[in-house]
Amino acid sequence: MQVLRYLGAAGPLRRFFAFICVALFTILVPPQMRASGEGGKPAPAKVSKEFMVFPDSVATEQWQHTARLVSSPQNLTLLNPGQCIRIGVVVTGDDRDTFLEETQLSYRVEFGGHTMDHPLAPPAGVKDLKAEGPGKSIESTSSLSVVAESWCVPDNAMDGTATIDVEIDSPSGHEKLSRTKIDVESFPTGSRRAFLSLAEFEKFTMGYHYQPVPARLFPAMLYFCSQPGLYSASNAMEIRSSFFGAALKADPAVAKYVTSRIMAQSGCPRELGLRSLLMGGYNIDPVLASMSPSDQQAFRQYSVPPDPYASDSQDKAVPQFEMLSGIFKATGQFAPIQKIASALLSRSDRDDAGNARKSSSQVSILSAGLATAYSTPSGSLAALQRTDPLAADYIESLIAAPDTSDALKTELKDLHTSLAAN
């Protein structure tokens, strides 16, 4: 009692005592308990004023093959002609599922003097987002709801700025979110930005499905062909054309542009461009018609592109998994991961997987001489699991899938356990 009377009489000391109590509460009580409030009362759902803009493929492809809990997509910072986007709204709070059941989203895009309105509609999909950063719990504290319709940049778009406004109707009422503006670059403008270093080239190719910039695919081809250490490596053309081909297949607008630019090239750039167009399933006759008869004859040996999904023979093993990894990096598709995983049971390569995990954590695995990290199924998955959150989500989904065999789950869990231990 004397202590309490003393604290009541001494204002500064009372404030210091209160500060100590708050500090101890912040340190000792988990964030999720603090968010719930006193007595475990649920924290009310709240919509973030900042919405997200990401590739349409996140909703149409990636989310179809992942669990409810996923890694967050990245906000797009630049758009090119032909690209399609989705809008995502972030909701926090313990009762966000119930909140989203009664929520509708709409958005408006203004670009090039035209306005496109997408009316109010329920979310087309909802995912819980993993917490990110060192020491963070994997337990989700937010959900991402995606609008029902996509918006695509016109194929003939010139340089400009797209303005996006989002409105929501929810149990909290009607509200407008913060306006977002995204620059749009035409293909001629974007293709003038050359690659200045290997690090820049690797960052572009490894993270393409997160931040696709189709206008830079042609400069990337030119850079690859300017580096003897890259294009002279074993199977380099097959591996790189799988990446470029998958990116071109996903975007017909840029494929048309690349076709026009390839016509003026020779040597490595033209060969890589033709191989990539073939891998993407495009007609290369317009380019062949611009070539001399002798050059056409020389290219005929490549007229049937390899299919990384078709063969598991030993002589094709090395380029196969590297090509599949390239397709994944370009598109974020589930199929390459599924194909690589299916080969785990047919090969014994756990030592290669361990080496891949070590190398991928220390150096860039796309540098010349290091692509072998992707040359085996376990090596490919280990490297992708460590470096790409979406690949890790796919692997977790495969482990949880009821139609995945117990033997394959064991192999995948071994990758997962090794990753957690490093």
Image: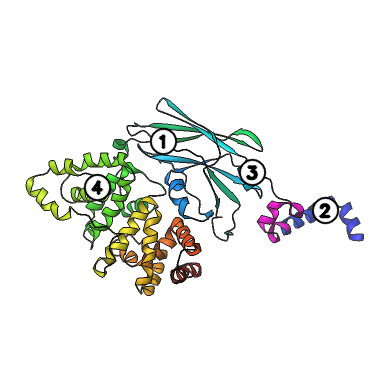
Mark 4 is surrounded, within 10 Å at the Cα level, by few (under 14), some (14 to 19) or many (20 or more) other residues, namely: many
Q: CA distance from mark 2 to mark 1?
A: 54 Å
SS for callout 2: helix
Camera-side mark, 4 or 2: 4
Residue hosting label 4: 277
Camera-side mark, 2 or 1: 1
* Residue at the image point whose x is 15% and y is 50% from the top: 267
| Residue 283 in picture, x, y percent from top left | 21, 44
Q: From which residue to which does the magenta span run? A: 25-46
Camera-side mark, 3 or 1: 3
| Residue 228 in picture, x, y percent from top left | 21, 57
Q: How is the image coloured?
A: rainbow
Q: Is residue 199 visible?
A: no
Q: Mark 4 or 2 closer to N-term? A: 2
Q: Mark 1 or 4 closer to N-term? A: 1
Amino acid at circle 3: Phe
